Amino acid sequence: MDDKIALVSCSGLSPLGLVVRAATVELALENENIVAACITEYSAQPNNCSPILDDAKIVTITGCGDDCASVILKEKDIDAIKNISADAVVKTYDLNPLDAVRLDEDGEKAVDVLKKYILNELERL
């Protein structure tokens, strides 16, 4: 995985939104070729997206079925090469984070399993 990867993730105010944000930011801090992109920034800009997406493979991480990150990018004519459902990953491990403000025990575990899953999927790109 040598290419620059932009993880564009859910920023929802749910427990899973917190899990997704924590996982993507941690991955960006731990891997120099990964950046965590702020979907709110792109939503607020009327006609463009941040240069952070230039020359990057874009992967969206969804928190729920609304898939806001992908919808916002599509409105800007930007296509992700992969979409990862955090909800599906967390359910696979029978985790149920319940706090939208602080990571509870299941939230911490969910961050760890989501990070591992994302890294595995990035290796396949």
Image (tube, rainbow, N blue to C red):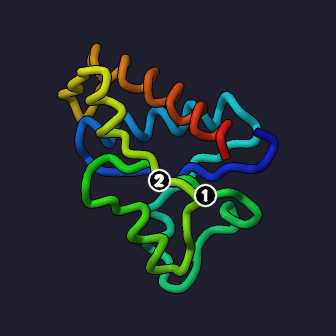
Q: Quadrant of the N terminus?
A: top right
Q: Secondary structure at mark 1?
A: strand
Viewer-side label of 2, 1: 2
Q: Earlier in the sequence, mark 2 or mark 1?
A: 1
Q: Which mark is residue 83?
A: 2
Q: Quadrant of residue 40?
A: bottom left
Q: Which mark is residue 108?
A: none
**Residue 70: x and y, percent?**
43, 64
Q: Which mark is residue 58?
A: 1
- The relative height of residue 16 versus residue 84 in the rendered view (above or below) is above
Query: Residue placed at 58% from the left, 80% from the top?
Result: 48
Q: Residue furthest right?
A: 2
**Residue 122: x and y, percent?**
63, 40
Q: Residue furthest front?
A: 124
**Residue 43: x and y, percent?**
43, 71
> How many marks are shown on the rendered structure?
2
Query: Residue placed at 50% from the left, 77% from the top?
Result: 45
- Residue nearer the viewer, 57 or 99: 57
**What amino acid type is highlighted by mark number 1?**
Ile
